[in-house]
Image (cartoon, helix red, strand yellow):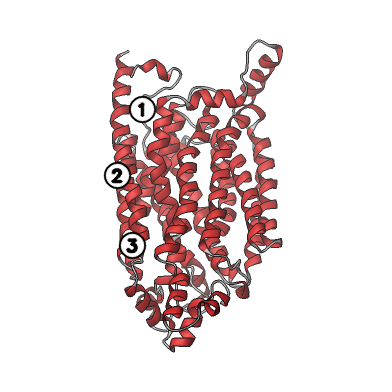
Amino acid sequence: MSTNSHSGNDLSEVKQLGMWASITSLGYIFWLVGGMELVERIAYYGVKASAGLYAKSPVSEGGLGIDLHDYGIIIAVWAMLQTFIPVFTGGISDRVGYKETIFVSTIIKIMGYLTMAFFPDFWGFLAGAMLLAAGTGVFKPGIQGTLVLSTKRENTSMAWGIFYQVVNIGGFLGPLVAVHMRQLSWDNVFYACAAIISLNFLFLLAYKEPGKDERLERAKKIKSGEIQQEALWKDALRELKKPVVIYYMLVFAGFWFLYNSLFDVLPIHIAEWVDTSIIVTSLFGPEGTSNGILQFWLGLNNEGTKVMPEGMLNLNAGMIMTTCFLVAAFTAKYRITTAMLVGCILSITAIMLVGAFNAAWMIVLAIAMFSFGEMMISPKKNEFMGNIAPEGKKAMYLGFVMLPQGIGWTLEGYFAPKLYQIYASKEIISRNELVSRGMSQSDVDAIPQGEAFMRLVDITGIEAQPLTHMLYEANNIGMAWYIIAAIGIISAVGIFIYGKWLLTMQRQQAAA
């Protein structure tokens, strides 16, 4: 493979500044976009973390009352739009201006949250998810392009690490807002998220676009005919054809399948099969806790007796929020692809643990292990793409980062809930159990979506927790997770080969 297929792409890795030197070298614009990202993520994760629970919650409890197959369709469409839009809007941000695209995206996102609140059915939630996806797709390149232009190559590793940490503060607070809002009523979740994202209009007042003079100067030259500018899609397509970008997309798609299943399916798995009251009992005794502050920060139910699924998953964001900069400092010593490979292996092991055990503390261990894996991969993907992007195409390349994510998440959005429905859905298992206990198929079909398990509790006279344990033991619940882990293993092998190939390319480039 000759090196000239990478014309314009700088594959060399630059020695990074130390931790404190990096942090003090970041300017006010970096911290301002960090604040905007934080606000946007609180709102986004407020809805994202509880979407599966909202979808399968029966209509009688204010949920959508749809099955996981329909939920999978919503997630797949959401994923496809959110991740493929930046591939093309990234370049628009480079040309039109970051401030303008951030402003427009915030309006689109507010419309998305309000649509979800006003139309609580399949089509309403789908429309809201599409608006939310489009808004996020337009928002990202402007924010990330600003970040690249407000940092230097000597501090990018730390900058992306801190930025990722900020994202996860939002990822931590959003689900906690959702836990407490949804216990009032589901539409409150969407209203709260619309209000939160509106705060970004205040940040925009203080925002000054870095590199604006160069952008306007370039636009002037294009207008006068001094520079020829290609149609955006042609430009994006030519960059996408480069082997370094194509292979990157293929090998990382599997990891993103694995990654997103944790957020799209694990909350449902925890709600259905994991007795989280054990955690509260170990920490506070059999009575639980009535301390409102602890209930909020730990994501407990209003009675303080069990951890809500979003609260369990919040360990992920909580760990990243508190330790990501340490992992970033640690992984700065290693080649980017090496760090990514180790991260992928940790995440695969975690998913296999979810399949093997339904004990609450084992799920906590799995989420912790997954989080370390994620910290080794996620900030690195942006650093990698930002580094190899040719001049004037930083936002475009950061849009490309979304492509493997898009392929992986879209496939996961459709197939992971389906896999779960086949092997592990408590609703389906309860319906089959009702039939095997003598209830006619037509009577079972008449039970509203989401209410079959409670009907089984009534008929058998067995309490919910022991009955859940019986059903878990009698069915192969873990199989769905093993299949997801297998997809991750294929991806890990791909990342290993890609890393070797890239090292050869770098040596060739250095020799030339």
The residue lying toward the viewer, choosing from 374 and 83, is: 83
Q: Which residue is label 2 attached to?
A: 342
Sequence order check: which comes first, mark 3 or mark 1?
1
Q: Secondary structure at mark 2?
A: helix
Q: Secondary structure at mark 1?
A: loop
Of badges 2 and 1, nearer the viewer stands 2
Residue visible at 45% across and 79% down? Answer: 435
Residue 13's tag is 1
Measure the alpha-carbon separation of dots 2 and 3.
Answer: 21 Å
Q: Residue furthest top?
A: 226
Res 18 visible: yes
The residue lying toward the viewer, choosing from 311 and 324, is: 311
Q: Is residue 494 left or right of residue 193?
A: left
Q: Position of residue 66 (x, y in %)?
A: 57, 65
Residue visible at 33% across and 70% down? Answer: 359
Number of numbered markers: 3
Sequence order check: which comes first, mark 2 or mark 1?
1
